Image: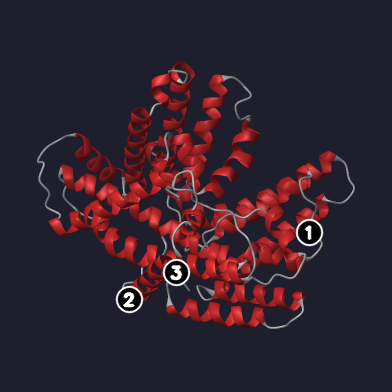
Amino acid sequence: MQFNSLIFLLFFLVVFILCRLAFPWKATKVILLVSSYLFYAAWNPVLVLILFACTIVSWLDSELIDRPRNQAQKRLILTIGIILNLGLLAYFKYADFFLSNLINLLRLLNVSVTFAKPSIVLPIGISFYIFRSLSYNIDVYRGKIKACPSFLDYALYVSFFPQLLAGPIVRAGDFLPQLAEPKKANSDQLGWGFSLLAIGIFQKQILCDLFLAPVADKVFNAVQKPLMIDAWVGAVAFTGQIFFDFSAYSTCAIGVAMCFGFSTMDNFKFPYAAIGFQDFWRRWHISLSIWLRDYLYIPLGGNRGGELRTYFNLLMTMLLGGLWHGAGWRFVAWGGLHGIFLAGERIAKKYWGDVKFFQKLPARIFFWLLTYVGVCIAWVFFRAESFGKAFRIISSMVSGGLVFSNIGLRDIAFVVPVSVLLLAAHWLLRDSSLEEAAKKIPWWLQAVILASIVIGSILGMTRGDMREFIYFQF
């Protein structure tokens, strides 16, 4: 079930009504847990066993860590839990990738080998629920939270269906305390929660799938090398597509959770208004950025070991963050490129960060647009099906050539206005939030905008062109 499907809306309505009935709080949590597993089973019932196994492993691991014992024993138990969880992730997500690269390496060494290619189905959302489990185990080990005594509460934390398939990567310390007392959304929460669900569906169905995705597909799936304008329009189209796609899922997830009375951190804060790449990663996929900082960058040493060590930690974090996104060298290249951007920015700030001119509006606008261009170029590696296609598109973006386009004026008419409005909206709201902006609009205009969004979303869902959320593959 996808958020932008009629069957999900029916599922959500049934679960919502059941949870609004006067059941005891424990019974309501059971309803949410069973509903979450049914939601996951709708993709592949067998893969529910992987979700359950991960939940059991991480819960038992933290129960053992939290008992009185010395630090070495706790570290050993944590290590076992991490190995088991990452082992699941490595097998299902990376086994084929590692095997293919091993065969290629052996061939370079003139060693001829043949392996039976494993037939592995990637459990949808596995990266997200394993990262939630790992953060829980590590936080218990660090003493930031106590092990959850209720398996019901912990299982609901791992599998809560709004956040199950593509985040946000909610921390146990933020979610589990919300299960202590009965939750029932008030009228304000319900109003904003349903509004966010409608906004998310509109982002996905109209802005992403109708306006931008077909143009990006036309450029990135083309056999021939694109012209200059084709390449830029395709890159800009995907830059908008992936934001609207992933932001749509997060917006829906936050809205659905809010309808049940749960609060969730924002996962995006107008990232295309970023001035610099450090600012970008404070705004893009915020829950993952914080996860990588707290559980990878800081444990590697962060910025505590001198300049060279800091750059190494930064690059390693981004390389592994890229690999987390997908089992392919293109994703590693995407992460590595962002690592280089971040390191370069850090060097520039060290030598020129105090120059007053750079704090003025013209310079800020220049660096904003420069950041956007850098992000667009990096997204090419993320979207292209191979390095060859990625380099062909990037070479077209920088090599000049013919300046007219063969993708069609209709395609440009879709991409350019949507992208300009996206950039303008992000810049104007960069220091605000969607909710704060909505409160400044008169109620009658809010009603008109929301009605238009709902109508557009319904029409979009009836088109029959249902695309999966991009981040489901991660």
Total of numbered circles in the picture? Answer: 3
474 horizontally vs 148: left or right: left
As drawn, the residue found furthest toward the right would be 68
For marks 2 and 3, the one nearer the N-term is: 3
In x, y percent, where is residue 280?
Answer: 45, 40
Q: Secondary structure at mark 2?
A: helix
For marks 1 and 2, the one nearer the N-term is: 1
Camera sees residue 120 = no
- Do the residues under discs 2 and 3 have CB atoms within 8 angstroms? no
| Quarter of image, res 181 | bottom right
Residue 148's disc number: 1
Give the number of the mark in front: 1 or 2: 2
Distance from disc 1 to disc 2, alpha carbons, whole Å, reads 44 Å
Q: Secondary structure at mark 1?
A: loop
Camera sees residue 173 = yes
Q: Is residue 281 above or below residue 239?
A: above
Q: Would you call the spot at circle 3 few (<14 residues within 10 Å), some (14-19), or many (20 or more)?
A: many
- Point 64% across, 68% down: residue: 261
The foreground one among 209 and 300 is 209
In x, y percent, where is residue 93?
Answer: 51, 55
Q: Secondary structure at mark 3?
A: helix
| Quarter of image, res 395 | top left
Give the number of the mark in front: 1 or 3: 3
For marks 1 and 3, the one nearer the N-term is: 1
Residue located beneath label 2 in the image: 459
Q: Is residue 194 above or below residue 126?
A: below
In x, y percent, where is residue 80?
Answer: 72, 49
Q: Amino acid at mark 2?
A: Leu
Distance from disc 2 to disc 3, alpha carbons, whole Å, reads 12 Å
- Point 87% across, 41% down: residue: 70
Q: Amino acid at mark 3?
A: Ala
Residue located beneath label 3 in the image: 198
